[in-house]
Amino acid sequence: MPTDYLEDEFRPAYETWQANKTPEGNAAFLKTIDPVINQGLQAYGNDSPLLRSRARLLALEAANKYDPKRSRLRSHIVTNMQGLRRISRQQGQVINAPERVILESQKLRAATQELADEIGREPTDAELSDFMRISIPRIAKIRKYQPGFSTGQAESLDPNSGGIAGRLPGDTGAEDLWLQIVYQDLEPTDQQILEMTLGMNNRRKMSNLDIAKALNRTPAAITQRKMKIQKLLDQEQALSPFISQ
């Protein structure tokens, strides 16, 4: 008769984890029991990133309470993952935002950081667009997402839903078309100044001083660049978006 029911395939990882319940130890153990986690997801939910994260937590909690003398590890973990049913139902009801928007927001933040590390400064939206292979309007809509919105509100911000919440005022007019033409012809630093000054693509509007700090330039240098940009804008429109800055 076996002294316990712990499966041989999990025994080394389980015993190692029992002696090392650190974040690193948890990660190694979770990697070993990933097939069990997949089984629980298939039985009680779906394989969405959000639900998988909760499944890993439930699996770890179940393993903490596991008694090898009473059952097999696999059956114990899967049985204790039934809470995924409730979580899955909640995701289908009112949530903060569609999962797609949340994931897009995470990808945008990660891409911004990765590109900033690579080029040594905050990337422009044009550079982000090329790097992520998505359009600038889509970047603007992703930025528009704010936690706490209802499902209906968030869907209006979903880049694939056809919503209009991410649209800037007047963005179908000739002035905005000319603004985009000027923007595309600017060098990266001037693109950033234009983005930060006007709050383009749902960025936060910034003052001269804040822009200077962000770009590691002097306020006087920012003003000079703004004057150059304004001359380009004035070739098509009489508006002066930098006057009040």
Image (cartoon, helix red, strand yellow):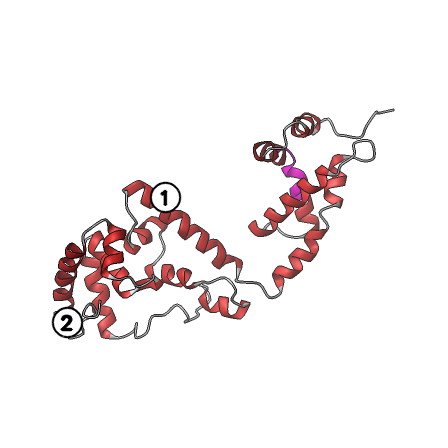
Q: Hey, which quadrant is residue 231 in on the image?
A: bottom left
Any part of residue 192 in sight: no
Say few, some or many: other residues with alpha carbon within 10 Å of mark 1 (under 14 / 14 to 19 / 20 or more): some
**Magenta-colored span:** 32-39
In the shown orientation, is residue 208 left or right of residue 47?
A: left
Give the percent coordinates (x, y) of residue 97: 52, 62
Vertical side of 157 occupied by 125: above or below: above
Say few, some or many: other residues with alpha carbon within 10 Å of mark 2 (under 14 / 14 to 19 / 20 or more): few
| Residue at (67, 40) in percent of width and height | 60
Q: Hey, which quadrant is residue 24 in on the image?
A: top right
Vertical side of 167 occupied by 209: above or below: above
Give the percent coordinates (x, y) of residue 244: 21, 70
Instruction: Give the residue furthest to the right.
Output: 1
Looking at the image, tell me whether mark 2 or mark 1 is earlier in sequence order. Answer: 1
As rendered, which of 226 and 161 lies closer to the eye?
A: 226
| Residue at (73, 43) in percent of width and height | 78
Give the percent coordinates (x, y) of residue 240: 18, 71
- Residue linked to disc 1: 114
Distance between mark 2 and mark 1 Cα atoms? 36 Å
Q: Please tell me whether the stretch drawn in magenta is mainly helix, strand or loop.
A: helix
Q: Nearer the viewer, mark 2 or mark 1?
A: 1
- Residue linked to disc 2: 236
Q: Is residue 36 magenta?
A: yes
CB atoms of marks 2 and 1 within 8 Å: no
Helix, strand or loop at mark 2: loop
Figure label count:
2
Vertical side of 110 occupied by 197: above or below: below
Give the percent coordinates (x, y) of residue 139: 37, 59
- The amino acid type, in three-letter code, at marker 1 is Glu
Helix, strand or loop at mark 1: helix
As rendered, which of 178 and 216 lies closer to the eye?
A: 216
Q: Is residue 194 magenta?
A: no
